[in-house]
Image: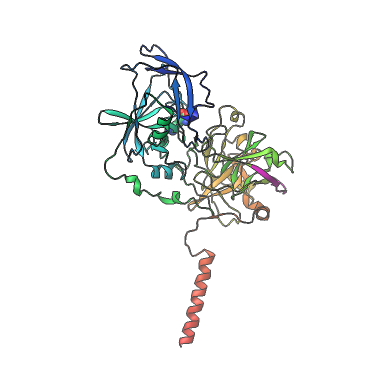
Amino acid sequence: MSAAHCFFRSSPSGWTVSLGLQSLQGANPNKVSRNVAKIILHPNYDSMTNNNDIALLRLSSPVRFTDYIRPVCLAASGSVFNNGTDSWVTGWGAVKEGVALPFPQTLQEVEVPVVGNRQCNCLNGVGTVTDNMICAGVLAGGKDSCQGDSGGPMVSKQGSVWVQSGIVSFGFGCAQPNLPGVYSRVSRYQFWIKSRIRSNRPGFVRFISSGLDPDSSYTCPGPLTRPSMSVCGNTLVNSHTGGDKSTVPEGTWPWMVSLHQNGVHKCGGSLISDNVILTTAQCFSTTSPNASEWNVFLGLRLVNGSKEFETSLGVLNITVSKMTGSNIALLELFESVSFNNYIQPVCLDISDSRSFPIGSQCLVTGWENKNNSRGKGAVLQNMKTQVASCGNLSDSDQICTHTMDLQEGGQGSPLLCKSESSWFQVAVVTVCESRLSHGDVDVFTKISRFGSFLKEIIDETPSAATLLTGSSPDFSVSLLIFFAVLIISLFLLS
Ligand code: ARG
């Protein structure tokens, strides 16, 4: 038994199965190998959602059981794995995100508790974990399966027998805090497995957890319950607010998009409504760019990496502002995107009602190196900085920050500053502006300079979550009405 996503087609040629193996390299006295006679992929395997990620491989001939080669029991339908059930996962996969198992590649094991499906959905993004999946991991991070472990077993012990509860399927990075690994739920496939194996069927054992599953009453905490439609600048899955220059887990900067021209990452950009992307005019060589050459990737972390949570959309049209000095561009998407934990709009600082005084914490997020993006896949980075004085360059249309190490692939990326609990995009990163850094500051053109251009193109931008303060206009209107009514009633009473 393995995972369907390990196989591109169901042709068994080229595959061998090694059993009784301890390490991938070096001597393996107990090793037995077989060719594969048949690969049976689950007919409802969905590579987009990973649903039904299960496959069966028929060996070319039976193997003799030894002390090193024995079948595992499978969780029978109706098995219950409560939140916290002790489980073990084994494999020869990466020992860390991007770090292969070192020589001689000895089989690894990790102990992880089951994380209930409701909680796992809240953490990984509601809707990503179906009833055909089971999650396991420690919320603090640090223990997980990883790339290359796919198809391998997750087992739990009941009495003296080991029962396979899961098949390594997918995860969001590896061992990240609050992102448990996701496994195919073996107990959901008893009927299918039996239907495909006529003789020498596997042993199914009903696994039972005692007591009430704490997951059954679990509801998502905080903002994760309702990815809001009209609120901007919220990070729903944000494990940190940015180190000096650190790679970020998916979903940390959910408005960040990668703009591809003819399939190659060209620029960063930001999602500012459900169908408009903001970037710099520098991405385009002409003032009337050809929209059909461009594609927008949302919910992305690696430029050419993991596809989970990723969406790509075509561009309907591109409008470039035509002011003197540096300009911005707006890309209208073919379709509106639906917001989720990994795709959210950023707030724009158009009205200039918010000021980010000298010393305010800000950051730039972007995919660092354009040249790197074809091969390994550059990882989304964030660079922390602070608002600095523009010195004698001072101009109300500009904002200055302490210098950052900005590179070409980062052009079009947002300069973000936090106000109350929302992230505002204050400027768009352009290459020459940052190269023309004056002394130890980078100079950016403020978004607010393009206020009227932006308002012309987009009817409505999402608004920041408002705190109830006296300065909100609706509140002052209600106060006014309240006092008017009070005075009129006093007048009538007297
Ligand atoms: N899809 C991966 C593979 O092909 C397995 C990833 C498991 N990831 C995790 N975080 N548990 O090997």
Residue 445 lies, with reference to residue 14, above or below; the image says below
Left or right of residue 293: residue 182: left
Quadrant of image for the N terminus: top left
- Residue under the point 49% across and 42% down: 252
Q: Which stretch appears magenta?
A: 314-325
Residue 385 lies, with reference to residue 448, above or below; the image says above
Q: Residue 124 occupies which quadrant of the picture?
A: top left
User: Total of numbered circles in the picture?
Assistant: 0
In reply to whether residue 317 is colored magenta, the answer given is: yes
In reply to whether residue 447 is colored magenta, the answer given is: no
- Residue under the point 74% across and 43% down: 288
Residue 144 visible here: no
Q: Most extreme residue toward the left, as rendered?
A: 159
Image coordinates of residue 281 in percent, x first then y, are: 68, 43
Q: Residue 101 occupies which quadrant of the picture?
A: top left
Q: Nearer the viewer, residue 173 or 44?
A: 44
Residue 429 visible here: yes
Residue 382 lies, with reference to residue 228, above or below; the image says above
Q: Most extreme residue toward the front, as rendered?
A: 198
Image coordinates of residue 204 in percent, x first then y, are: 33, 31
Residue 224 lies, with reference to residue 61, above or below; the image says below
For ligand 1, which image quadrant applies? top left
User: What's the colour scheme?
Assistant: rainbow
Image coordinates of residue 484 in percent, x first then y, are: 51, 78
Image coordinates of residue 236 in percent, x first then y, are: 47, 47
